Image (cartoon, rainbow, N blue to C red):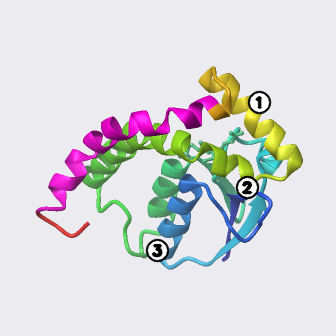
Amino acid sequence: MTILLYDLVGRDTTRPFSPHCWKVVMALAHKGLDISTVPTRFLEVPAVEGGVSKTVPVIRDGETVVADSFDIALYLDEAYPDRPTLFGGEGGKAMARFIERWSQVTIHPYVTTAAIMDLHAMQDAENAVYFRQSREQRLGKRLEEVMAAREAGLGNFRASLEPLRSTLFYQPF
Ligand SMILES: N[C@@H](CCC(=O)N[C@@H](CS)C(=O)NCC(=O)O)C(=O)O
């Protein structure tokens, strides 16, 4: 059965931009499951599947609806044990959760602020207003000020990637 993925897009519906939705696309590909995407703009997220989540990704698999990229991965491994595994057991789940948290706490904040004006430019007029308001409220600054701090934050961000650089010494990815 085809799994439906609500995938975040801007003005260009062929260019989904949410890394959390990308993770689900990759998980579905790894498991060899068929996927059909529903291009979803920011302002459409609250109505997805009757308001099941404030964020995407959300999937529908038959009667089952699951939100949150990690929960979706857990669901896929449990629902499709005959397909290639995503976690390879409990140890893999714990390690994947650590990587997910590390990425959210260390990589995500800088990358999203560094790309903030590009993300804003990708939205249609209505969604651009929502994006600016919600992000400026969250960050306590104008988007232009967030953008202006990008260069100053680059050195620290590069240094924070050292665990990845050092891992690449031992293995290709
Ligand atoms: N923990 C969630 C985070 C998902 C998330 O933050 N999604 C963002 C897009 S990348 C979203 O839907 N934001 C809606 C909004 O800001 O209104 C997951 O991994 O699925």
The picture places residue 71, in percent across and down from the top left corner, at 51, 48
What's the residue at 60%, 54% (across, down)? 18
Q: Amino acid at mark 3?
A: Lys
Give left or right: position of 138 versus 98.
right
- Distance from the alpha carbon under mark 2 to that under mark 3: 31 Å
Magenta stretch bounds = 145-169
Dominant secondary structure of the residues highlighted in magenta in the image: helix
What's the residue at 43%, 76% (across, down)? 83
The image quarter containing residue 152 is top left
The picture places residue 118, in percent across and down from the top left corner, at 64, 51
Q: Which residue matches tag 1?
A: 133
Residue 168 is covered by the magenta coloring: yes
Q: Amino acid at mark 2?
A: Met
The picture places residue 136, in percent across and down from the top left corner, at 68, 27
Q: Secondary structure at mark 3?
A: helix
Q: Which residue matches tag 2?
A: 122
